[in-house]
Each structure stands twice: as structure tokens, then as C-alpha cells.
Image: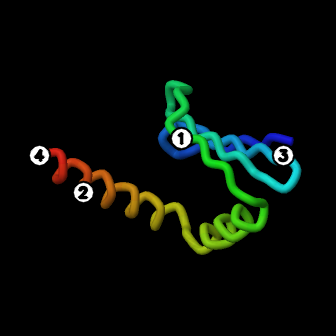
Amino acid sequence: MTQRYNTFDGGTIDVETRGALVDLHLRNAAGRTVATVEMTEDDAARLIANLGGSDEDALEEAYQDGYRDGEEAAA
């Protein structure tokens, strides 16, 4: 079973369950795969539980902080 989630920047996260494992396929807005992660169902459940405490504003702020850090590191 595969579930698709949209990101605020136009990308997607596909979550595919394969028995006791879960594959996460992260794609950018152009549809290019930028990461594929394989984890156990338990690890995926913990990841989702930890994400549950964030609201959209907090996620945007964290994204912008990380983006600025990346620009500074590249300079």
C-alpha cells in the first residue's frame, strides 16, 4: 500500500508499506527522487509521532533556518 503526502514546496513523500518495512520516497517539485529511506514500521511510527507536535508555522520557520544555514555554508 502506498500513501502520498504533498510538501509545501510542491514535492511529495510517498510512503510504501512492504511487510514489516516502510519505504519513504522523497521527491522534489519536478518529481525527481531526492532520497529513498527504508525503515521498520516501528521506526516510521516513531518518526510520525515526533512530527505530530509541529504546526505549519514551526515547520516553515525550521525550513527557512535550514535554508539560510545552507546558503551561509555555501558562501
Q: From what the image shows, is residue 35 above or below residue 33?
A: below
- Is label 3 in a helix, a strand or a loop? strand
Q: Where is residue 29 in the image (x, y as percent from the top left)?
A: 51, 31
The answer to whether any part of residue 6 appears in the image is no
Horizontal and vertical percent position of residue 37? 61, 48
Residue 75 in view here: yes
The disc, 3 or 4, on the residue closer to the chain's N-terminal end is 3
State which tag comes first along the sequence, 1 or 2.
1
For badge 2, the amino acid type reads Asp
Q: How crowded is mark 2: few (under 14 residues within 10 Å), some or many (20 or more)?
A: few
- How far separated are the C-alphas under marks 1 and 3? 18 Å
Marks 3 and 2 sit apart, C-alpha to C-alpha, by: 36 Å
**Residue at the spot of label 4:** 75
Please report whichever mark, 3 or 2, sits nearer to the chain's N-terminal start. Answer: 3
Q: Which of pointers 3 and 4 indicates the residue nearer the eye? A: 3
Residue type, label 3: Arg
Dot label at residue 69: 2
Label 4: how many residues lie within 10 Å, few (<14), some (14-19) or many (20+)?
A: few
Residue ID for mark 3: 18
Tell me the residue at 43%/58% (across/down). Answer: 60
Secondary structure found at label 4: loop
Q: Which amino acid does label 4 sit on?
A: Ala
Q: In this view, does 69 lie to the left or right of 25?
A: left
- Closer to viewer: mark 1 or mark 2: 1
Residue at (86% x, 42% y) in the render: 1
Q: Relative to residue 71, is residue 28 drawn left or right?
A: right
Q: Which residue is drawn at 75% across and 59% down?
A: 40
Mark 1 lies on residue: 35
Mark 2 element type: helix
Mark pair 1, 4: CA separation: 25 Å
